[in-house]
Image (cartoon, rainbow, N blue to C red):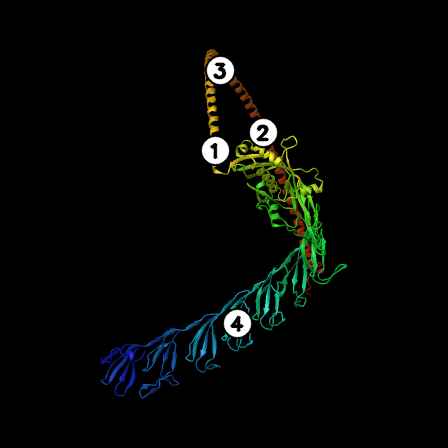
Amino acid sequence: MSQDRSHRRGGEDALYRIAPHHYIHVLDQNTNITTLHIGPKTYIRQDNERVVFGPERMITIPPRHYCVIENPVARNDDSEVIMDNGQAKLLHADQEIRHAQDPFPLYPGEVVHTKVSPLKVVEANSALRLKALLDFESGPEKRTAGDEWLFEGPGTYLPRKEVSIVEPVKSTIIKPNQAIKLQARKECVDRDGKQRVTGEEWLVERVGAYLPGVYEEVVDIVNAYVLTEKVALHMRCLKSFTDRSNQSRKNGEEWLIKMSDTETYIPDVYEEVVGVVNITSLSNRQYCVILNPVDENGKPQLSKKKLVRGECSFFLMPGETLEKGIQAIYVLGEHQGLILKAIEKFDDGPTKRSPGDKWMIRGPTEYVPPVEVEVVTERLAIPLDENEGIYVRDVKTGKVRAITGETYMLKSDEELWNKELSPSVEELLASGKDPLADRGTRGGSGGGKPRDKTRVVTYRVPHNAAVQIYDYKDKKARVIFGPDLVMLGPDEQFTKLALSGGKPKKPNVIKSLCLLLGPDFCTDIVVVETSDHARLSLQLSYNWHFEIPDKNDEKAAAKLFSIPDFVGDACKAIASRVRGAVAGVPFDEFHKNSAKIIRCSVFGLDENMKVKDQFYFNQNNLIITSIDIQSVEPVDQRTRESLQKSVQLAIEITTNSQEAAAKHEAERLEQEAKGRLERQKISDEAEAEKSRRELLELQANSAAVESTGQAKAEAQSRAEAAKIEGEAAVDQAKLKAEALKIEAESELNRLSNARAAENRYISEQNELEVAKAKQMSAIEVEKFKNMVQAIGADTLKAMANAGPEDTG
C-alpha cells in the first residue's frame, strides 16, 4: 500500500491512541522525516507533525505462509534496522520475502508487493520448474541468471527473490505396454545419465510415474502393438540407427516384426509403423504367386516371381505383393482342360518350352501353373446332341468346320467361330414363328433370345414346306423338304423369300425362309372394266399348291425357287386374263355369268368346250386349282346405285312371299296347339284322381304303423337298457380285478427294488471299508518305509548298537 492511499484521517486529530500491534507513520513537516510509532501508546501530535498513515494493524504471517515486501529496510548483521538521520534506510527496487514471524509493521517507504499467501506444497510425482532471475548461491550450488531446475516433491517450496516459478510439472504415468516419447529442449543429461543434445528424442518404457527433467518435454505417449500369430508389424526406418536387437537399420529400410520376435512392440523414435500385416494362409487346395520376393538375407528380388503352394501360412514381406491374390488350384474333370502359354523359357519335364508356346492339358488332374506359365483360358467339353453343333476355326490354317452330334473340346489351336447372317435372316430366325400359323407376320419382330453365333444355325422346316440353302464355297444349292431340321454349314446361307401380300397385292410384304407347298389360298383385288365401260372391283380368292413329282429330283426341287415372288407373278397373270375376258362382255351379262366368265378366262376350255380344272405354271410347278369370287363392287357411283336399286326390289319381293307363308304356317300351328292342350287337360284330371286315391291308402297305413310302432319301440328300449346295464357290470368287475392285479404287482416290484438297492448299498459300503483299510495299511507301510529311508540304514544300525553313555 502506498502512502497516498494511507491517508485515512488527514492528520487532523491531535491525540492518537495506538492499540497493541498497531502502528502509525508521522511526518515532521520541518525536517520532512517520517517516523514509525508502534503501540500500545497514546501519541500527541505536534503542530509541525502530521499523521500520514495509520493507525494500521501490523502484518501477521501465520505458519507455512509468506509475503513479499518491496523496498525493504536495510538491516545490519544483527538484524537491526539501519537508521539514516532518524529515518529507516530503504533498499529501493529490492524485494524481501518474509516468512512466519512475530507481527511486524511497515516502515515508511515499505510496500506489500505480495499479500500473505500460503507456501506452495509440491506433491509426490510432481515438481516446480524454477528459473533464476539473478546470480546467487544456495549452499554448494551456484545459480546463474537464466538457469532452470526442478524442485521435486514431496516438499514445501520456500520462495526466493532471485527465483521465479515458470510452471508446475506433473509426472506422466507409464502403464504396461506403454512408453513416453521425450524430446530434449536443450543439451542435458537425462535421468538415466545419458547425454542428450537439443532436439533429440528418446523413449522411456519404465512402468510407473515418470517426472520429466527440466529440459525434457513429453512429446507423445506411445502404446505398444500386441502381436499375434496372425498379425505382424510393417516397420520403416526414418533414420539410420541400431534397433533393440542390435541390428543396424538404414534410412528407408523396411522390415517385419512378428510374434516370434516379441509379443508386444513399442516403435522406436526412429521407426515408423507403416501398417499391420495380416497373415496369408493357404489351404492344401490353394496357391499364390509372390511378386518381388525377399530372399533369405531380406533383400528383395525385383522383377522375380515365387510360387507358394498350400498348405502353409506366411507374412508378406515389405515390397512383396500377390500377383492375382490367393488362387484355387485348377481341378480338372474328365471334360475339362486348360490352354497354357509359356511366358519364359523353361523345361516342362522332358519337354522344353519356349516363350509364346501354347499347349493344352486335359483332366482329370490337378494343376498349379508355374511362374513361367500363363493360363490363357479354361476349356470345357461342349456336349452336342445330334441336332446341335458348333463352328470351329483352326487358327493356324484358318479353316472353319462344323462339328455336330458329339462331345467336343476345343484344342489349343482352335477357337469358336461366329457365323454371321444378314439382319433380316437373323430377325426371321429369332422370331421363332411357324409360317403355317401366321402367314401375315412371317417376317416376325425378333422377340426371341439373341442367337449364339458360335452354335450351328438350325431351322425346323415345317410340314409340307421347303427351304433352299446355298453353299457359296461349292457353288451349289440344296432344297430340304419338311418336316426336317436344317443345319447350316460354315459357308451356307438361307435363300430368303420376299412374297407379295395384302389386298391388293404389294411386293415384299411377306418375308420367310421356307416356301409353303400348299394347298393354300391367296386373295387379291382386281379392278376390271366391261365392254360398256362399267368399272368393277373384284375380290378373288385362288386355291394353289406346288406339284412335286419327285422330291429327290434336284432340278425339279430347284424350280420351286426359280421365281422369287411366285404369289405376285401368279396374281398378275390371273388378273391379266380376268381383265381381258371381262373387257369383251357387257355389265349385265357379266353380272349374271361372272363366275363362268372368270373361270373360263383363267383355266381355259378343253376340246369338249368344258372349263379345265387347273391353271399350271410350268416355271415353278405352281398349280391354281379353283377361283372363288368373294365380292363384286362397282367402282362407278351411278352403276353402284342402279345395282343397289335392283337388289332392293328383289329383296322386297322375296320378303313379302316369305311373310305370307309364315302367316299361314302360324295359324296352322295355333290350331294344333289348342287340340293338344284339351287332350292334356283331360289326362291331367285323371292322373289327379288316381293320386288322391293313393294318398288316402297311405294315410290309413301310416296310422296303423304309428299305433303298433310305439309299443314295439318301448319294449326294445327296455331290453336294450337291461343289456347295457349287464354288460357295464361285467366290464366294471373285470376292471376292478385288473386294478388289484396291477396294484399287487407294483407293490411287489417296489419291495424287490428296495431289497436290491439295500443289498447294493451294504455291499458297496463293505467294499469301501475294505478299500479304506487297504489304503490305510498301504499308507502306514509307506510311512514306515519313508521313515526308515529318511533315518537311513546306518542310523538304525547305530541306534541298535548304542548303549548307555559312558560317564566314567
Badge 1, how many Cα within 10 Å: few under 14, some, many 20+?
few
Quick one: quadrant of the C terminus? Answer: bottom right
* Residue 160 seen in the figure: yes
First of labels 3, 1 by sequence position: 1
Front tag of 2 and 3? 3
- C-alpha separation, residue under disc 4 versus residue under disc 3: 119 Å
Q: In this rendered view, identify the residue nearer to me: 577 or 726.
A: 577
Residue 604 image offset from top left, x and y in percent: 62, 34
Residue 36 image offset from top left, x and y in percent: 30, 82
Q: Secondary structure at mark 3?
A: helix
Whether the residues at callouts 4 and 1 have beta carbons within 8 Å, the answer is no
Q: Amino acid at mark 2?
A: Ile
Q: Amino acid at mark 3?
A: Glu
Q: In this rendered view, identify the residue nearer to me: 169 or 622.
A: 622
Is 60 left, or right, of 523 in this rendering?
left
Front tag of 3 and 1? 1
Q: Which mark is residue 644?
A: 1
